[in-house]
Amino acid sequence: MNETNFQENVVAQKLHQCYTCVRQRTDFVPKLALVLGSGLGDYANNMKLEAEVDYHSIAGFPVSTVAGHEGRFVFGYIADVPIVCMQGRVHYYEGYDMADVVLPIRLMKLLGANALLLTNAAGGISETLRPGDLMLIKDQISSFVPSPLIGANIDELGERFPDMTGIYDQEINRRIEITATSLEIELRHGVYIQMQGPNYESPAEIAMCRALGADAVGMSTACEAIAARHMGMKVAGISLITNMAAGISKEPLSHKEVQQNADAASLKFRRLISRSIVNIASGLL
Ligand code: HPA
């Protein structure tokens, strides 16, 4: 990397510092990065473990101040595919700059991952979705949160004005769809919208999201996808619909309901992810 640019740019400096810190702990080179959302929290148990690096142990890494939100990178294999998992992600609503929120994504790319599989919990806006459904993300709306690319461009990572026409990779999506069919798991598809959080949306906001073309709403993912595309990673995303968004169902939303539905769908989600990773890696990564 160009040293001058790195020394001048605070975001790049921090990224480089985190990279060095992780590399002191492991020389594992992942091909694919996986971000674990609700319902997949314990997914790393499915992996052949090679190394674990707690976020707390990485100098400069944005760590959650909320008790019980400790996170870590888990390095290892699914079948014979080398992957890195983010067990616990960083959310904008925790109060970090967007550049910090996407630092882990950039770091996983620097560590070797050229593809990124994002997972999340989301509220269903489209009437055709039901709690427990899995939705392949075909496109996204991120206009209600700041772009992670605001500020001086880090030329070593990507260009100033990256194209966002095809954020979600068509070939990876095709492989995930084929995988779902082969496992007899119903896979919906739609547009994901990222809202700021941490409060859930009002019914009027959900009506707005729907008018804008969104099928599911969450508080993560879209900013991560932008940072990944900026760096040229191939991106895919799957939302687990944990609840119907505000005003769509008559029930008030509760975080408990979101967690319970996430846990209930966890097994099918895990099966889909594991088989998809193998099918994505085959000949593509
Ligand atoms: N809104 C925003 N984020 C969410 C929701 C929701 O309804 N459900 C799960 N994450």
Image (cartoon, helix red, strand yellow):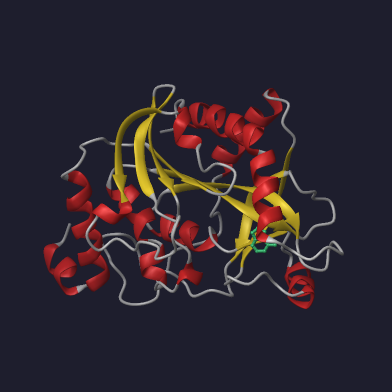
Q: Please state which of residues 205 and 7 is positioned toward the viewer in this rendering.
A: 205
Find residue 46 and report its horizontal and vertical position in percent. Answer: 47, 28
Q: Is residue 218 above or below residue 98?
A: above
Please report the residue visible at 38 percent of the width from the left and 43 percent of the height from the top. 114
In the rendered image, the vertical position of residue 1 relative to residue 282, given as above or below? below
Q: Is residue 54 left or right of residue 147?
A: left
Give the residue displayed 78% in from the left and 77% down from the top: 204
Q: Left or right: 263 with respect to 23?
A: right
Image spot of residue 260 (x, y percent):
68, 47
Ligand 1, image quadrant it occupies:
bottom right
* Along the line of sight, the residue nearer the viewer: 241 or 65: 65
The quarter of the image holding the C terminus is top left
Which residue is nearer to you in this view: 238 or 176? 238
Identity of the residue drawn at 62% across and 56% down: 139
Which quarter of the picture shows residue 59? bottom left
185 or 178, which is in the foreground? 185
Q: Indicate the position of residue 275 as horizontal and vertical percent values.
A: 56, 27
Q: Is 275 situated above or below 117? A: above
Image spot of residue 112 (x, y percent): 30, 42
The N terminus lies in quadrant: bottom left
Point out the residue furthest to the right here.
250
